[in-house]
Image: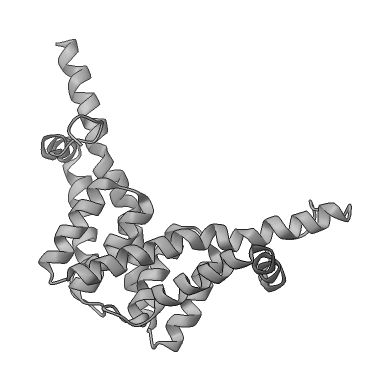
Amino acid sequence: MSDSIYKDDISKYMGDLKNAAPELNDAWMGYHNEVFADGKISKKDKQLIGLACAHMTSCPYCIRSRTKLALAAGASAEEIAETVFISMRLAIGQPYAYSSIAFENFDKMSNKENVTEGNFFSKNITPQIKDFHDHSGTMFEKFSVFNEKVYADGHLSKKLKKGLMGLACAILAKCAWCVRSCIKDGIQEGVTKDEITEAINIAMVMNAGACWAHAGITMEVVDKSLSKDK
């Protein structure tokens, strides 16, 4: 990464960010540290949820740091691998659910119906999803196998996978139907409102954390620009 815009060591530039706005950075770190403290969800599981979220935000610094933190908290290679596949499944979830919009509009436009009135997002997308399944053929069969294996109890529990980790990823995917699905399955697996609250806060931190980590690029530009002016 050292030959690209992403540097292996961004500590200097992150230090510059902290020095330029110490009170803001302290407030941010106070919130961050509270979110990742032991709570209804263990520290290890929180770091794994954070790692899944980091893959959703595509932040290389976050992926690297959360992997290290998850390992330090006792996560195994198998647990980390299953975490990555959960993020992949939720990355699939958004276009999968949004296929309903494509199919609904295709049908309406084909019938010369008005598509500019009413609600854009339907709460019940079952007919469109079924139509998508039917047209997908063997692709849907393969997807179904992947979907079942991803969420099955393994090194990580189904409760953690879908009810908490999946929920955090679904929120970052901005997929309302995915959020609803994760809540439904999470309740079946015994998640509590306190647990989903902690998972949502992790998603919030990881979304903002990608901005914070990438600030190293910003502060590098600031440093180089100001150096030229001297």
80 left or right of 180 in image: left
The image quadrant that residue 84 belongs to is bottom left
Confirm whether residue 30 shows in the render.
no
Above or below for 72 versus 3: below
Numbered-mark total: 0
> Residue drawn 40% across and 87% down?
189
Q: Residue 9 appears at what percent x and percent y?
A: 12, 39
Confirm whether residue 12 shows in the render.
yes
50 left or right of 139 in image: left
Q: Residue 80 appears at what percent x and percent y?
A: 24, 66
The image quadrant that residue 125 belongs to is bottom right
Most distant residue in the front direction: 138
The answer to which of 230 and 91 lies nearer the viewer is 91
Please name the colour scheme applied to the rendered image: one colour
Above or below for 162 versus 18: below
Most distant residue in the right direction: 112
134 left or right of 24 in image: right
The image quadrant that residue 191 belongs to is bottom left
Q: Residue 62 appears at what percent x and percent y?
A: 25, 51
The answer to which of 123 and 48 lies nearer the viewer is 48
Which quarter of the figure is the N terminus placed in?
top left
> Residue drawn 43% across and 65% down?
89
> Residue drawn 34% across and 70% down?
199
Above or below for 230 versus 44: above
> Residue drawn 15% across and 38% down?
10
Which quarter of the figure is the C terminus placed in?
top left
Q: Residue 93 appears at what percent x and percent y?
A: 51, 63
The answer to which of 37 and 185 lies nearer the viewer is 185
